[in-house]
Image: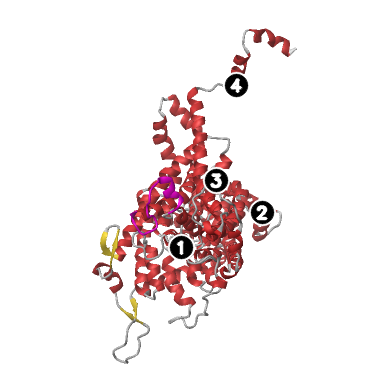
Amino acid sequence: MATTTTTPAESHLTREEVARLAKPKKSPRARIGMIASYVGMGLIVLYCIIPFYWMIVSSLRQPTEGRSTEFLPNPPSIENFQGVFSGTNNFGRSLINSLIISGTTTVLTLLFGIVAAYALARLQFRGKAFVLWLIMACSMFPLIILIPPLLKMFSSSPPFEWFPYWINTYQAVIVPGLSFGLPLAVWNLTAFFKQLPVELEQAAMVDGCTPGVAFRKVILPLAAPGVFTTAIIVFIGAWNEYLVALTFLQAPERQTATVAISKFTGTTGFDTPYGTIMAAGVIVTVPLLIAVLIFQRRIVAGLTAGGVK
Amino acid sequence: MATATAVGKSSTVAGDGHKHKKNALSDGQGRLAWMLLAPTLLVIIVVAGIPVLLSIRESFFQTNSGVDPNTGLVAGGESFVGLKNFTDIFAGANQVEGSYGTMDRFWNAFLNTTLFTVVCVLLETVLGVAMALIMSKAFKGRGVVRAGILVPWAIPTIVSALMWKLIFDEAGVMNRILHQQILWLADTGASFWAIVIADVWKTAPFIGLLTLAGLQTIPAECYEAAKVDGATAWQQFTRITLPMVRPTLVVAVLFRTLDTLRMFDLPYGMIGPGKYRVETLSIFAYQEATQNRYGPAAAYAIILFIYVLLVAFVFVKVLGADVIGDSAPPKKKKKKGAGDDDAKTSAVPSLEMMGGAH
């Protein structure tokens, strides 16, 4: 039935006109704007990706062609990746070190951060503003201000003879790392907890939960995306940390991956072994990138959850 | 800040009885709160508070060097020198040749730090806002762009420094594209711009991402009303977009500024230590510390810290950066809308911090 009624109407129109009418109307200006925004988005992606592409390409060249400017590796080779793990670099070990340090930092940061954020988000007490400002100020310290005293402290030099010798230990990096991770974690988590209505906990408490249990069984699962996001961000921060690790981890077998890369002498001699360095850079970065790409929605959504609802 | 504290306190005292009804979880739980905060505060005091105080003490001392005239032994330990480490900055005993002529190494580093910050943050902001505007226009493919934008952010700064080092190599791809023979890495004026390019690459997309979050909070009605009133695209941008995205943007820019003032990894990894055209205050202080000149190192670090605090203060007071959105929670909790604002401002700067180049 429907088709027969439309037939007379169609007879007045060519097929192209019908197609045009079927589409939502767009002014030419809007269309240009659309195209421009896609071109713009393409440019943004290229801008972000191209330098990284160069790193990947350079890592896939032969070791002798480290500085080649060919846009494709010719011939491609994975020798650089094998070179990264060759004897003198200690790179495999440094990856494990990085993993231990960043993992521990993340877990401890979350542990301390969650309880602190709960207090800041849910409890009323005097001095809350002071605590918030203290945590805030903590993220404003130039890292460098901590280096001289911590260096003296951790190396047990006077007047810190009583302090255990911490140079070349994991805790020398983990403990300062906490002070960089914590402001971020507390800040983020407080925001996430605050978003959740307090009535949820009250309901749980009416049902007989203590505040602690209500928090653990109701709020924490609901805030899990926030906790997870914070974990990723703290982990990436700890994994990328350089200055503290450079200062306190001098023994090659204790270095983190970032420090190891910056100290690469490679296997090929005096020239900067760019191929190997780039291969190592790719190895250090790719796991992070995969994580970021898988969870990008969550990272960004978690970040903007408060703002865009 | 002072007002925020006052507000917080006064309403805690005044509205106490009222709050019991409002929030059943907060019945006199101050002690519990401090217990829960204890681990965090302990870490902050031990790893940040005490070292900062020690640094302040250290800045009044100098490591003894040379031979002690009394004993004839190599001198050890430290001696109190008062403000000498600070006044030495003006004595000009450590002249170096940088981009700004011959001057004391401290002032050279100071100027580098300032210029890096101004140039980088300016470019990052302009580029970041442009990116955010583009992203806000498109619906399809936003996920791809977002993924792409997180790439520079996720790469460790030191790795990106080495990556750009290869790109800016004398025989590298940048010179090939430009058909020039610029010595980017040889501590020349070009080195400064190489660092700027690398830093902008790493952080502009992120400002873009944060600004996008701010843009998405602007109701479409604003633009519709503006269109009805016949506003041009530029007017819409300057009269609606910028003012409404301002709170997000100011906080993002503040944290970028603080990060850039403390820049270390990028010049250190890309150009190297002791290169005066790109030496920042952080690198200078680090170099001094590693040569056992703890006193001057601490003095420079403290000056940098004061500098950072001053800049933060200016941002908060002059530009009205709402850094600590939840500083007056008892008041704001009553309004749901204000609470949401808190969440936004507090989530935004914190990720921004991690994007930086410490």
Mark 4 or mark 1, earlier in chain: 4
Identity of the residue drawn at 49% across and 23% down: A28
- In the picture, the disc for residue A221 is 2
In the image, residue B81 lies at what x, y percent? Answer: 30, 78
Q: Identify which amino acid the numbered label 4 is placed on.
A: Lys
Q: CA distance from mark 2 to mark 4?
A: 45 Å
- Per the image, the residue denoted by label 3 is B148
Residue ranking furthest to the left: B91
Q: Identify which amino acid the numbered label 2 is placed on.
A: Pro
| Nearer mark to the viewer, of 4 and 1 | 4
Q: CA distance from mark 1 to mark 3?
A: 31 Å
| Nearer mark to the viewer, of 2 and 3 | 3
In the image, residue B167 lies at what x, y percent? Answer: 46, 52
Q: Identify which amino acid the numbered label 1 is placed on.
A: Cys
Q: Is residue A240 above or below residue A87?
A: above
Q: CA distance from mark 4 to mark 1?
A: 56 Å
Quadrant where the N terminus of chain B lies? bottom left
Mark 2 or mark 1, earlier in chain: 1
Q: Chain of mark 3?
A: B
Which scheme is used to colour this image of the protein?
Answer: secondary structure
Residue ranking furthest to the bottom: B71
- In the picture, the disc for residue A23 is 4
Q: Identify which amino acid the numbered label 3 is placed on.
A: Gly
Q: Are marks 2 and 1 on the same chain?
A: yes
Q: Do the numbered discs 4 and 1 sit on residues whose CB atoms are within 8 Å?
A: no
Q: Do the numbered discs 1 and 3 sit on residues whose CB atoms are within 8 Å?
A: no
Magenta portion: prevailing SS class: loop
Q: Is residue B93 left or right of residue B183?
A: left
Q: Are marks 2 and 4 on the same chain?
A: yes
Q: Nearer the viewer, residue A308 or B100?
A: B100
Please tell me whether mark 3 sits on a helix, a strand or a loop: helix
Please tell me whether mark 2 sits on a helix, a strand or a loop: helix
